[in-house]
Image (cartoon, rainbow, N blue to C red):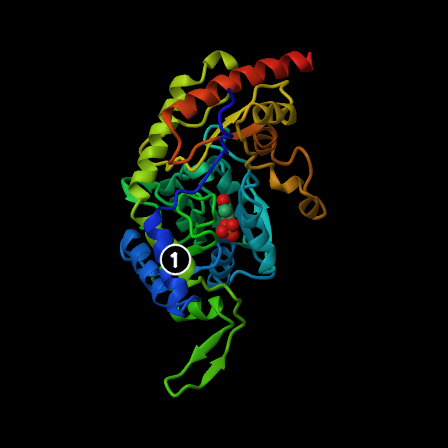
Amino acid sequence: MSEPFLPFTRPSIDEETIAEVANVLRSGWITSGPKVQAFEAALSEYCGDRPLRAFNSGTATLEVALRLAKVGAGDTVITTPLTWVATANVILEVGATPVFVDVDPATRNIDLDKLEAAITPKTKGIIPVDLAGLPVDRDRLYAIANKHSLRVIEDAAQAFGASWNGKPIGSTGDFVSFSFHANKNLTTCEGGALVLPADIDTGLCERLRLQGVRRFPDGGMDVDVLGGKFNLTDIAATIGLGQMKHLAAFTARRRELARRYFACLDPALGLELPVADFSNSNWHMFQVLLPAGVDRGNFIAAMKQRGIGVGVHYPALHLFTLYRAMGFKEGNFPQAERIGGTIVTLPLFPAMQDSDVDRVCAVLAESLASNLRSAS
Ligand SMILES: *Cc1c(COP(=O)(O)O)cnc(C)c1O
């Protein structure tokens, strides 16, 4: 008897939200309107009433944040090579140069012990990434950033619902960027939000979001800055509002499932486990490193054959062709390369059953055993 395929993630969208999306479709107002405003208000409230604007992707929020921070040609921005490539692509998009700092092998986030040495007079900002929803140490990060007067754009795409010192990520700090892509802890299908620091003009943020257009009460308009096309739709915002009602429960359930993984994964398998953090992390992903000698491709195929979806998040991005062409190569960031070469994301999403975790653990043990056999 074969059980249904278990993907590594799956969104949970309730029937009430689906009905409300249908209402919006019938209302005649389907692009940015009242639902986006309501979603922004709900998100802002969650982020300690900080100014916040919704976007059509997390990537767009990062790009606009860089523009608002006046980062451009001649500037460098420090980030991690172990992230979704969007984090570094936006630096190139605004004409600046990414500078990578290797990751801490325990947290898999940017190594704060190595951060300061990478700062030069050209450094304009830092984009830390909370990989898998495990927050970068905000106290240490801001101590370094403030000492060198650097802007911080928190790529908290994976950290919505996570916290630091008991406060939600987004409620403190400089710029904070979230993604609401389908795989993220809160989704609008595609979408994002940018929390703005107090010194940034929210009107300019809105203009960068939509063609630079400034509208006047008499119906006239002007364009004084080059903006993009980054506005969220009311349909997406309606889904986001429906998701917000479940955020706390989603995070709590993810933490329970993560705890269960720690309990059921046999230490004898030789996997390298994530940091067991149940107060800050939102457990966006549960990621393990395969033992040396295991062929990841074969392992993933073996899992899939047994009905379990496994992801790779992410190969070290400096080894992508685009970045190699800029001069990056093997050996530049050994930890990111080792982790990026052996990491796998196991299934974890709020609708998963406890028994699903047990099944993943059993199938993983089997797949590792068969993989090691076939490799020898
Ligand atoms: C998802 C993600 C992004 C980009 O978000 P999109 O909404 O897909 O544009 C950026 N950085 C990280 C770390 C992400 O996980």
Residue furthest front as drawn: 1
Q: Residue at x 52, y 66 (%)?
A: 229
Is 302 or 14 nearer to us in this picture? 14
Give SS at disc 1. helix
Q: Is residue 360 above or below residue 214?
A: above
In front: 339, or 122? Answer: 339
Q: Which residue is mark 1?
A: 21
Q: Residue at x 49, y 38 (%)?
A: 110
Residue 211 spot, x, y in % from top left: 51, 72
Q: Quadrant of residue 305?
A: top right
Give the total of numbered labels: 1
Quarter of the image with the C terminus in it: top right
Q: Residue at x 34, y 38 (%)?
A: 251
Foreground pick, 129 / 289: 289
Q: Is residue 16 visible?
A: yes
**x and y percent of residue 105 in the render?**
50, 29
Mark 1: few/some/many CA within 10 Å (<14, 14-19, 20+): many
Residue type pointed to by label 1: Val
Residue 306 position, x and y percent, is 56, 23
- Kindly tell me whether residue 125 is visible in this rendering: no
- The residue lying furthest to the right in this view is 325
Q: Is residue 208 above or below residue 164?
A: below
Residue 202 at x, y percent in the picture: 38, 67
Residue at the far bottom: name it: 218
Ligand 1 contact, mark 1 (Cβ < 8 Å) = no
